């Protein structure tokens, strides 16, 4: 519920005391007239003006323009009959609160035209009534011209600030959501790799337990060590997302492929020069996911990884001799390709997939991303 005093403009130009003075001042101009009829007309016009002002303040539809029209007509009447031009300040205040740009400029132009026209006509009709207060009239005209723009721009700025605050809150929510998704993906990838390795080594130990108990015992020892490593990595991941190195990831990949009894070849140097930590972290995760897909889905016997540093991009190619992949790998649910693309998009990278006799994944990240990361 709106308070009665909220109809007074909250503007730094004029305090509520000044507006109260503007409310009572017209009675001085009205009672200067000796005619009871003129006094009655003046009080009636003043009552109708404030009634229209109140209705215009409460209106939320097109009726506000009707009430503003009544206010402008009454203001013109008060100006011509009693030389009181200051009601135009009230109307100017409310015009500044109109949100519709078209409606604002139309009413704003009409109000200035009516106000200036009434003042000019008043000077011709009874100059003695206007000449003593010409300085105050001039100030009122300036206020009529500037006040609506001041209020219109302030309301527009406050609206934009409100939208900006909403956008900041939305961005904060999205950042939190993205961070949760990223941590969830990283936990899935970390645990998925280690659990896959444990499963493969368990199968291998089961095969070796009858024919080579010593080798089976070694595999069981590796399983225990891998489980301990997985637990440690999960704790580190929760506490602080640690940076991953391609060389370290390559060693883990060799263990996975060896446990899967797949041949493994490496071409090129995994130590890229001048690579940002965030880029190397993403490349390590994508490389791990790519090799995990080879072990799970390719049904191949060999895997080749090639590292290449070009002048404008870092390139990693993962290739196998398996059954191949179709339609960009989207037919394989849970293959992790969507997560790889999301990570690479974050650093302006790309993922290309070539099927056929085997599958080739090409991971590319532009070198220019390092400048962006360093600037950040």
Image: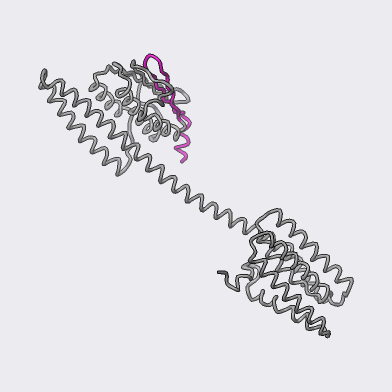
What is the quadrant of residue 241 in the picture?
top left
Q: Residue furthest top?
A: 357
Q: Nearer the viewer, residue 375 or 220?
A: 220
Q: Is residue 101 left or right of residue 348?
A: right
Task: Verify whether residue 44 appears in magenta.
Answer: no
The range drawn in magenta is 349-376
Task: Verify whether residue 369 appears in magenta.
Answer: yes
Rendered residue at 68%/59% (across/down): 62
Coloring basis for residues? one colour
Rendered residue at 82%/81% (across/down): 38
- What quarter of the picture does the N terminus occupy? bottom right
Expressed as whole percent of the image width and height from the top left, the position of residue 353 reads 42, 22
> Looking at the picture, does residue 119 appear above or below residue 103?
below
What is the quadrant of residue 99 in the picture?
bottom right
Rendered residue at 67%/74% (across/down): 19
What is the quadrant of residue 204 in the picture?
top left
Expressed as whole percent of the image width and height from the top left, the position of residue 351 reads 43, 26
Expressed as whole percent of the image width and height from the top left, the position of residue 224 reads 17, 32
Rendered residue at 63%/61% (across/down): 60
Q: Residue furthest right?
A: 124
> Looking at the picture, does residue 224 appear above or below residue 176?
above
> Looking at the picture, does residue 104 appear above or below residue 179?
below
Q: Nearer the viewer, residue 331 or 312?
A: 331
Total tally of numbered discs in the picture:
0
Expressed as whole percent of the image width and height from the top left, the position of residue 174 reads 44, 45
């Amino acid at each position: 519920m709106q308070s009665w005093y909220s109809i007074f403009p909250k503007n730094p130009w004029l305090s509520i005391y000044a507006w109260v003075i503007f409310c009572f001042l017209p009675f001085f101009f009205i009672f200067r007239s000796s005619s009871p009829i003129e006094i009655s007309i003046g009080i009636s016009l003043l009552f109708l003006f404030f009634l229209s002002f109140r209705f215009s303040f409460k209106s939320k539809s097109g009726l506000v323009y009707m009430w503003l029209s009544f206010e402008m007509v009454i203001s013109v009447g008060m100006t011509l009959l009693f030389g009181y031009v200051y009601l135009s300040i009230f109307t100017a205040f409310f015009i500044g609160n109109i949100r519709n740009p078209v409606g604002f400029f139309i009413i704003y132009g009409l109000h200035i035209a009516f106000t200036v026209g009434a003042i000019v006509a008043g000077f011709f009709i009874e100059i003695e009534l206007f000449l003593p207060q010409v300085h105050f009239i001039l100030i009122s005209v300036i206020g009529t011209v500037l006040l609506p723009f001041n209020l219109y721009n302030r309301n527009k700025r406050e609206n934009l600030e409100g939208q900006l605050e909403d956008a900041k809150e939305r961005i904060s929510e999205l950042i939190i959501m993205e961070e949760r998704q990223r941590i969830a993906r990283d936990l899935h990838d970390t645990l998925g790799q280690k659990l896959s390795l444990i499963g493969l080594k368990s199968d291998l130990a089961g095969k070796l337990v009858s024919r080579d108990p010593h080798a089976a015992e070694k595999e069981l020892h590796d399983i225990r060590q891998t489980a301990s490593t997985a637990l440690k990595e999960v704790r580190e991941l929760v506490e602080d997302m640690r940076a991953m190195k391609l060389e370290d990831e390559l060693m883990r990949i060799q263990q996975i492929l060896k446990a899967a009894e797949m041949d493994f070849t490496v071409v090129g140097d995994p130590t890229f020069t001048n690579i940002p930590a965030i880029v190397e972290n993403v490349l390590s995760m994508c490389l791990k996911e790519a090799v995990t897909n080879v072990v799970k889905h390719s049904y191949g016997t060999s895997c080749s990884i090639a590292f290449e540093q070009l002048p404008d991009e870092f390139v990693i190619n993962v290739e196998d001799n398996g059954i191949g992949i179709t339609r960009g790998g989207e037919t394989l649910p849970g293959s992790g390709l969507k997560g790889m693309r999301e990570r690479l998009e974050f650093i302006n990278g790309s993922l290309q997939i070539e099927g056929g006799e085997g599958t080739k994944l090409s991971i590319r990240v532009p070198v220019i991303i390092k400048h962006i990361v360093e600037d950040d």
